[in-house]
Image: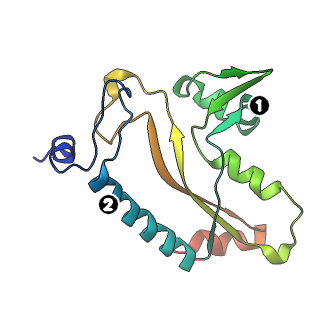
Amino acid sequence: MHDHRKLGRELGIFDTDPLIGAGLPYWPPAGAAVRHTLEEYIRDVERRAGYRHVYSPVLGKRELYEISGHWSHYSDDMFPPMRVGDEDLLLRPSLCPHHALIFRSRGRSYRELPLRMAELGGMFRSELSGVLGGLTRVRAIQLNDAHVFCTLDQATAEAGRRSP
């Protein structure tokens, strides 16, 4: 069987370095070109499917993840809080809470719904060193994540839509 870790290094697609840290891959020029092409393809497919793209910070206050439920369910898999001034900030483990805040950032008319929101964004998980491997188990990953905000009457149709 082919090992993606060996092929990734041989082809110059991705690699890791102990000085960067385990589970934190980097992408040299050949890999960056592949990644860029894939990301543009994903964004194009999503745009055609009616998704609007956003960017959100890679950090959030601990309170955000307490409210969303991520802290109580996933804190063992999250990096520990960083104390900055009087706030505890966390590297985000998912984009969901950030997208919910973007949605609620202003009043919206039902005519704006459904609102399909997407982001290719960094997510961070405090994986144990024994489970890290290539690109399958990492501590930092760019992931495509999308959320649909809709009325209850629109939910069935949205759930039946083909994913982009």
Q: Nearer the viewer, residue 27 or 72?
A: 27
Q: Give the mark, 2 or 1, whose residue is nearer the N terminus.
A: 2
What residue is rendered at 66% in x and 71% in y? Answer: 156
Label 2, residues with CA under 10 Å away: few <14, some 14-19, many ≥20: few
Specify the amino acid type for callout 1.
Glu
Specify the amino acid type for callout 2.
Val
What residue is rendered at 48% in x and 74% in y? Answer: 45
- Counting from the top left corner in percent of width and height, residue 68 is at 72, 39
On residue 49, which mark appears? none
**Which residue is labeled 2 in the image?**
34
Residue 160, image quadrant: bottom right
Q: Nearer the viewer, residue 143 or 111?
A: 143
On residue 63, which mark appears? 1
Residue 60, image quadrant: top right
Mark 2 and mark 1 in contact? Answer it, CB < 8 Å: no
Residue 94, image quadrant: top right
Reply above or below: 16 against 122: above
Q: Nearer the viewer, residue 86 or 112?
A: 86
Q: Relative to residue 8, is residue 163 drawn left or right?
A: right
Determine whether the residue tagged by mark 2 lies in a helix, strand or loop: helix
Q: Relative to residue 140, is residue 52 drawn left or right?
A: right
What residue is rendered at 32% in x and 60% in y? Answer: 34
Q: Relative to residue 153, is residue 31 drawn left or right?
A: left
Label 1, residues with CA under 10 Å away: few <14, some 14-19, many ≥20: some
Determine whether the residue tagged by mark 1 lies in a helix, strand or loop: helix
Q: Relative to residue 128, is residue 65 drawn left or right?
A: right
Camera sees residue 164: no
What residue is rendered at 26% in x and 50% in y? Answer: 13
- Counting from the top left corner in percent of width and height, residue 127 is at 43, 27
- Residue found at the very far front of the displayed protein: 29
Tag nearer the camera, 2 or 1: 2
Camera sees residue 153: yes
